[in-house]
């Protein structure tokens, strides 16, 4: 891809469960992009994870020690976590685009939903989804999770575990997907528990997609 390219990783709601997975992916993709960013609330990721689990009193102490965190905290009051993450993504994408970057989004679980919902609006180059949450296994069907996928115009690769409780093998038959979406299956679950060799195959598939070497019209298949 010509020009400066940045990858923004939008992590799942419980990012701690994906620490090793995201570390593996970023280490393998480092040479492919000029910059790699992880969506956060303006603080380093490990501090965000810590901050979210603090008591109200402890949060106040933290903010008094880190005054630069106050603007992000105040803006977030009254908003859902999902809404806050959408706002953060919009802000980060626009900032990078002003600097001349083309943007590719990689979303994990809920992060994949955010990426696909905003991709067309933000003029994103490509989207990569790992474990798209088509359906919460503990909730009734929620069309808001997937209805936008049939209209999505941004080239998108969805890598879905065949044993994913949020939508496994067969989701390409159960949901209407735009012809700009390529869905392929990985022999894993929602957590993407893969060994090194399997992870390398996933990364190579992502690289091929970024390099426009994957036919979006090809039938969904299990490639790992």
Image: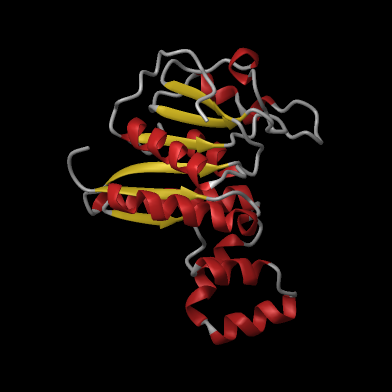
Percent of width and height locating residue 167: 67, 28
Residue at the image point whose x is 59% and y is 48% from the top: 83
Nearer to us in this view, 207 or 41: 207
* Whole-percent x, y for residue 40 in the image: 50, 60
Q: Is residue 118 visible?
A: no
Colouring convention used in this rendered image of the protein: secondary structure
Q: In this view of the protein, can residue 220 be seen by the observer?
A: yes
Which corner quadrant of the image does residue 217 belong to?
top left
Compared to residue 171, the image places residue 33 above or below, namely below
Residue 185 vs 52, above or below: the answer is above
Q: Residue at x 59, y 36 (%)?
A: 131
Question: Residue lying furthest front in this view?
Answer: 197
Vertical arrangement, residue 43 with respect to residue 2, above or below: below
* Number of disc labels: 0
Q: Which x, y percent locates residue 174?
A: 65, 15
The location of residue 190, given as percent across then percent down, is: 65, 39
Q: Is residue 81 above or below residue 180?
A: below
Task: Determine the residue positioned at 61% across, 48% down.
Answer: 82
Quarter of the figure that contains the N terminus: top left
Q: Nearer the viewer, residue 223 or 155?
A: 223
């Amino acid at each position: 891809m010509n020009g400066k390219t940045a990858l923004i990783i939008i992590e799942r709601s419980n990012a701690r469960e994906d620490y090793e997975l995201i570390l593996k992916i970023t280490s393998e993709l480092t040479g492919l992009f000029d910059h790699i960013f992880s969506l956060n609330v303006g603080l380093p990721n490990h501090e965000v994870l810590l901050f979210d689990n603090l008591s109200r009193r402890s949060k106040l102490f933290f903010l008094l020690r880190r005054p630069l965190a106050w603007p992000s905290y105040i803006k977030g009051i009254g908003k859902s976590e999902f809404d806050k993450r959408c706002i953060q993504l919009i802000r980060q994408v626009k900032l990078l685009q002003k600097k001349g970057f083309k943007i590719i989004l990689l979303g994990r679980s809920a992060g994949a939903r955010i990426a696909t919902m905003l991709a067309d609006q933000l003029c994103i180059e490509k989207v990569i989804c790992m474990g798209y949450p088509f359906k919460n296994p503990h909730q009734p069907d929620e069309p808001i999770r997937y209805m936008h996928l049939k209209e999505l115009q941004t080239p998108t690769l969805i890598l879905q575990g065949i044993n994913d409780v949020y939508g496994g093998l067969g989701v390409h038959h159960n949901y209407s997907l735009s012809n700009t979406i390529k869905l392929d299956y990985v022999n894993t679950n929602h957590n993407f528990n893969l060994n090194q060799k399997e992870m390398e195959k996933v990364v190579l598939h992502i690289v091929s997609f970024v390099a426009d070497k994957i036919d979006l019209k090809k039938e969904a298949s299990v490639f790992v």
